[in-house]
Image: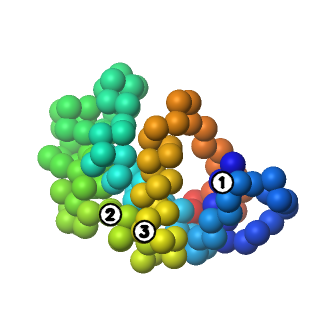
Amino acid sequence: MIVIDPRYTDTAAGREDEWLPIRPGTDAALVAGIAWVLINENLVDQPFLDKYCVGYDEKTLPADAPKNGHYKAYILGEGDDKTAKTPQWASQITGIPVDRIIKLAREIGTAKPAYICQGWGRNARQTAS
């Protein structure tokens, strides 16, 4: 179990395999950096995304959506902001080292099944991060 939390709290209380401290409010940047690795290393479950997700890529966008208005374009830097959400980008924001973001993404992408549990942090802030 990997705990990602700015503080070492009772959530893990020594039961975790690893604690990754993250800057408060930067969870979304970490997720984006992980997504960049998953996409670039072809670790996404494309059939699942094609079947169940709207807006992941160009082919799953609604017909009236703007070109490159999908999640994959946003992550790869092909969207409006033209910023690739690389592990280097995420590391500068989150404080988590680049190599650990890459390793975490690979662990998630190769685990069968993978389980991610979001905790109180998303519920505790207006920005949901």
Front one among 45 and 77:
45
User: Judging from the image, what secondary structure is the residue with disc 3 in?
Assistant: helix
Q: Is residue 12 above or below residue 7?
A: above
Q: Between label 3 and label 2, give the one nearer the viewer.
A: 3
- Visible in this render: residue 123? no
Horizontal side of 108 relative to 126 (left or right) equals: left
Horizontal side of 105 relative to 65 (left or right) equals: right
Residue at the image point whose x is 36% and y is 39% from the top: 43
The image position of residue 86, as x and y in percent, is: 32, 63
Q: Amino acid at mark 3?
A: Val
Within 10 Å of disc 2 (Cα), the crowding (few <14, some 14-19, many 20+) is many
Q: Tell me the tag on residue 2.
A: 1
- Visible in this render: residue 86? yes
The image position of residue 99, as x and y in percent, is: 44, 65
Residue at the image point whose x is 38% and y is 64% from the top: 87
Residue at the image point whose x is 81% and y is 53% from the top: 15
Horizontal side of 101 relative to 78 (left or right) equals: right
Q: Amino acid at mark 1?
A: Ile
Distance (Cα) linking label 1 and label 2: 21 Å
Residue at the image point whose x is 42% and y is 58% from the top: 102
Which quadrant is home to the C terminus? bottom right
Q: Tell me the tag on residue 86.
A: 2
Residue at the far left in the pictured view:
67
Q: Tell me the tag on residue 98.
A: 3
Quadrant position of residue 128: bottom right
Distance (Cα) linking label 1 and label 3: 16 Å
User: Judging from the image, what secondary structure is the residue with disc 2 in?
Assistant: loop
Quadrant position of residue 120: bottom right
Q: Amino acid at mark 2?
A: Thr
Callout 1–callout 3 Cβ contact below 8 Å: no
Q: Is residue 14 above or below residue 1?
A: below
